[in-house]
Image (spheres, helix red, strand yellow):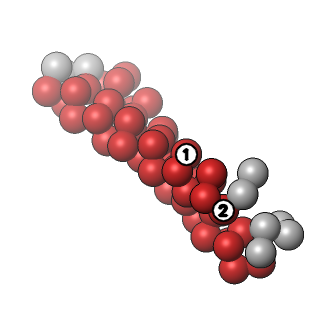
Amino acid sequence: MGEFVDKVKGATNEAIGKAKVAVGKSTDHPEMVAKGIVQEAKGKAQSKIGTIKGKFGDRF
């Protein structure tokens, strides 16, 4: 995948993760909060990978 695709997927996962955390907190659902935190972290990692690919010209 290219830099742009990784960054878009990362941003999407971060947004969905944040939404899960918010819904889980408001409904007192700790399992959903945990899943949201994991998904948000996954999104941040994908975004970082996209940034690294951009610096190396997608050769990574």
Q: Which mark is residue 9?
A: 1
The structure residue drawn at horizontal position 42% and vertical position 46%, both measured from the top left corner, is 14
Left or right: 56 in relation to 36: right
Q: Is residue 44 visible?
A: yes
Q: Which three-letter amino acid code belongs to the residue tagged 1? A: Lys
The structure residue drawn at horizontal position 69% and vertical position 79%, both measured from the top left corner, is 55
In front: 3, or 31? 3
Which residue is outermost to the left?
26
Left or right: 5 in relation to 22: right
Badge 1 density bin: few <14, some 14–19, many ≥20, Cα 10 Å: some
Q: Which mark is residue 3?
A: 2
The structure residue drawn at horizontal position 72% and vertical position 57%, both measured from the top left corner, is 2
Element under label 2?
helix
Q: Is residue 45 visible?
A: no
Quarter holding residue 25 = top left
The structure residue drawn at horizontal position 16% and vertical position 20%, both measured from the top left corner, is 27
Q: CA distance from mark 2 to mark 1?
A: 10 Å
Is 34 situated above or below 10? above
